[in-house]
Each structure stands twice: as structure tokens, then as C-alpha cells.
Image (cartoon, helix red, strand yellow):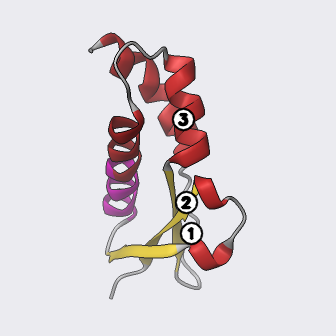
Amino acid sequence: MSQYKVMVDDNFHYMEEDERREYGTFATPEDAIAACRRLVDQSLAEEYRPGMTATQLFDRYTSFGDEPFVVVASGVAKVDFSARAYAQSRVEALCADR
């Protein structure tokens, strides 16, 4: 039974729950977090433009990117993952690599 559901908010529609979508369910917290990281990395790659600074990329992500989070089944320990914190940790490397 999958106890970890990854949901995705669209930063362009901030606070609009009707724009939220389910990405998938996972058996372990590690799998759910890995899925969240993939979604953030994909959003960062989509928002990147040549010559962007890390700050500009982070601003684009927080305005237009996908912000995944993990919902756990009743009685299951909360999963600690912040899409924004993860994105912030990735933008420097992504902009430096290009």
C-alpha cells in the first residue's frame, strides 16, 4: 500500500487549490522525495534561459515552477521536504554549469 502521495502546486496559480494535481503515490518516503526532486529539477530546467543568474532562475521558479510536496497516510510520520529550499540549493550549480 502506498503511504506517500506527491501533490504538485503550480506557483503561477499560488494558493489556488483547484490547480493542484496528484503526481503519484510511493511506498517509501525516499521514493516520494526523489520524485519531488525530479519535478523541481525539471521545472528549473524549463525556466532556465541562457545567461540567467541563480537569483533570476530562483525568481522564475517561484513564479512559474511546480512546487511538489508529500502528503502522508494517517498515522504515518510527516515527510520533511521543501521544494523551495531544494530549488534554492540547486540554482547556483545549474547556472554555473551552463
Q: Are marks 2 and 1 in contact (CB under 8 Å)?
A: no
The residue tagged 3 is 60
- Count of marks overlaid on the render: 3
Q: Which mark is residue 89?
A: none
Q: What's the residue type where badge 2 is placed?
A: Asp
Specify the farthest residue to the left: 98
Quadrant of residue 42 within the rendered picture: top left
Q: Which residues are magenta?
A: 29-38
- The residue under the point 37% across, 25% down is 49
Quarter of the image for residue 94 reads top left
Marks 2 and 1, how far apart in space? Answer: 25 Å
As helix, strand or loop, the secondary structure at mark 3 comes to helix
Circle 2: element type? strand
Predominant secondary structure in magenta? helix
Q: Which residue is mark 1?
A: 77
Residue count near mark 3 (Cα–Cα under 10 Å), binned few <14, some 14–19, many ≥20: some
Question: Mark 3 or 1, which is nearer the eye?
Answer: 3
